[in-house]
């Protein structure tokens, strides 16, 4: 029988509801018959449906990493709930009668194999004419990139002029009629391929608008931070783009500026510049969802550790409001994820990663031993590194680190983490996520607040003028578990 885990089923499901419905069909005895091939590459089931005849659903594993699911039901979801139910049947080791692989499946396999072979042959025997076409296409793409860079440079000059005016006159001048002018200006940045600049400008407008409504200093302070980042991004981007134009080098390279300006990396592009990790073993430590009003989209974020290196990475899934139902939602992932090739985005700190395919397995004792070994024992030295990171206007406002603690305690009204060497840091939530510090006091066993490892999100606390840390999860010394405060 195939090694099927619930996490694998959830990863293949189009949404959580489909997976839940599949589980319900399986546990409710929805299958009349189950069959499998002798070689274990094909599974099929007859599943009760709403009509008189049962639905025929199958899973073809001729390509182990890319199974093909088929079902006679009218559902437009893929895989449908019946295909997912079949996987639950496989996961729970239900009895499958041995059968011959149906002729129509064998024919489909032959067609897919022939198509793949044809593509391989065409690539090997590419004539010189094709090489010329590729060369011409490459030249055309290079020319288009140069035009785009020049257009971006024009847009940066326009943005710099607006930023200088705001710095000189003050953010208060964005109110009233001028606010609509800035909104029109923001729309223009899209014509200059400056989507990142546009988002920052939109965020600036949103914060000033909110400040005018409630006069809360947090909005004004945030607007100042956004303006500072805009100013820094303009200067760095102009220098970067000017050099690429002067050097006649429009190709992508290892810099976070491309994405900051609004570019979207392809996995193949990241691999081409060497930004990848092979044979990664990843463990998700936390997962959360935020809504970005400036981008008009939900951002689903996962915090992960790579067990072979101890690096902490982030995954991000962007779901715009206008296409929400067309973008599959991410979810919490439990256990270990083994990834043949993982693409790593340029940048510093907890950079973003993505992958195409992966397999799932249970966490082992050795995995937890490695996980704990990567935790820092001195919070003082970590805070020093955090300060240096956060001083860069282009940096993320939060950096995630693993800290080994001796206890989580209360000092007056404050909750603090005491690291193994005796130093402390206040545990305090930042604005963009749910409140998790108070959940520490809700843990059923207070021993979980002693001698463990915590994933902390370090951030600058403007009210206290110091670095604080938000707790995300605990890995206790007493048991092999990841206790999430948010997922």
Image (cartoon, helix red, strand yellow):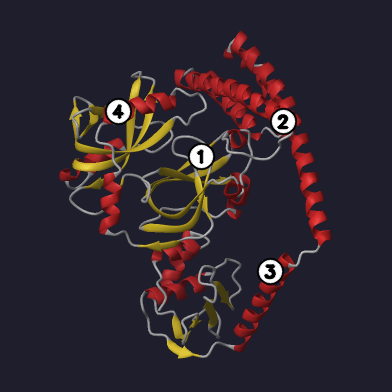
Q: How many angstroms separate mark 2 from mark 3 (CA)?
A: 37 Å
Please name the residue shown 70% across and 26% down the image: 242
Picture disc at residue 247: 2
> Mark 1 against mark 4, which lies toward the viewer?
4
Residue shown at 56% from the left, 42% from the top: 297
- Name the quarter where the N terminus is drawn: bottom left
Closer to the observer: label 2 or label 3? 2
Q: Which residue is mark 3?
A: 120
Q: Is residue 452 at least partly visible in the picture? A: yes
**Residue denoted by label 1:** 291
Up the image or down, 30 lies above or below 436; here it is below
Of callouts 2 and 1, the N-terminal one: 2
Q: Residue 367: x and y, percent?
A: 30, 55
The earlier-in-sequence mark between 1 and 4 is 1
Work out how far the residue at label 1 is from the one at label 4, CA to CA, in angstroms. Answer: 33 Å
Kindly report which numbered mark, 4 or 2, lies closer to the viewer in this rendering: 2
Q: Position of residue 458 (x, y in %)?
A: 36, 31
- On screen, residue 61 versus residue 177, left or right, reads left
Nearer the observer, disc 4 or disc 3? 3
Q: Label 3, label 1: how many angstroms apart (C-alpha)?
A: 44 Å
Q: Residues within 10 Å of mark 4 (few under 14, many from 20)?
A: few
| SS at circle 2 | loop
Residue behind mark 4: 381
> Of discs 3 and 1, which sits in the foreground?
3
Q: Earlier in the sequence, mark 3 or mark 1?
A: 3
How far, Cα to Cα, is label 4 from label 2?
Answer: 41 Å
Disc on the earlier residue, 4 or 3: 3
Secondary structure state at the residue bearing disc 4: helix
């Amino acid at each position: 029988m195939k090694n099927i885990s619930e996490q694998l089923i959830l990863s293949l499901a189009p949404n959580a509801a489909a997976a839940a419905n599949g589980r319900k069909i399986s546990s409710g005895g929805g299958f009349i018959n189950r069959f499998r091939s002798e070689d274990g590459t094909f599974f099929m089931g007859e599943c009760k449906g709403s009509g008189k005849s049962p639905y025929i659903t199958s899973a073809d594993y001729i390509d182990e990493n890319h199974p093909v699911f088929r079902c006679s039901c009218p559902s437009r979801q893929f895989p449908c709930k019946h295909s997912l139910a079949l996987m639950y049947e496989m996961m729970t080791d239900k009895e499958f009668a041995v059968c011959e692989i149906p002729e129509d499946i064998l024919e489909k396999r032959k067609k897919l194999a022939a198509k793949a072979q044809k593509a391989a042959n065409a690539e090997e025997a590419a004539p010189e004419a094709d090489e010329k076409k590729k060369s011409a296409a490459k030249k055309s793409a290079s020319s288009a990139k140069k035009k785009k860079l020049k257009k971006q440079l024009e847009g940066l000059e326009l943005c710099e002029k607006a930023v200088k005016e705001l710095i000189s006159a003050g953010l208060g001048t964005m109110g009233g009629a001028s606010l609509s002018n800035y909104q029109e200006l923001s729309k223009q940045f899209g014509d200059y391929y400056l989507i990142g600049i546009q988002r920052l400008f939109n965020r600036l407008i949103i914060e000033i608008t909110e400040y005018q409504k409630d006069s809360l200093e947090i909005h004004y302070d945030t607007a100042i931070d956004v303006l500072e980042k805009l100013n820094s991004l303009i200067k760095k981007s102009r220098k970067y783009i000017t050099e690429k134009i002067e050097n006649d080098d429009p190709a992508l390279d290892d810099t976070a500026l491309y994405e900051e300006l609004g570019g979207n990396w392809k996995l193949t592009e990241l691999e081409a510049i060497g930004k990848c990790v092979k044979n990664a073993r990843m463990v998700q430590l936390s997962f959360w969802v935020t809504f970005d009003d400036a981008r008009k989209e939900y951002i689903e974020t996962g915090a992960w550790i790579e067990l072979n290196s101890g690096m902490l990475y982030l995954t991000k899934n962007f779901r715009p409001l206008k296409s929400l139902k067309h973008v599959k939602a991410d979810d919490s992932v439990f256990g270990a994820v083994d990834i043949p090739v993982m693409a790593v985005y340029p940048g510093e700190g907890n950079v973003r990663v993505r992958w195409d395919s992966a397999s799932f397995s249970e966490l082992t004792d050795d995995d937890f031993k490695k996980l704990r070994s990567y935790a820092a024992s001195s919070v003082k030295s970590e805070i020093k590194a955090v300060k240096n990171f956060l001083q860069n206007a282009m940096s993320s406002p939060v950096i995630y680190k693993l800290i080994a603690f001796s206890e989580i305690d209360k000092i007056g009204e404050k909750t603090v983490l005491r690291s193994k060497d005796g130093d402390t840091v206040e545990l305090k939530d930042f604005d963009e996520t749910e409140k998790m510090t108070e959940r520490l006091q809700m843990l059923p066993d207070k021993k979980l607040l002693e001698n463990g490892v915590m994933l902390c999100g370090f951030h600058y606390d403007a009210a206290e003028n110091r670095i604080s840390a938000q707790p995300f999860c605990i890995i206790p010394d007493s048991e092999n578990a990841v206790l999430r405060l948010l997922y």
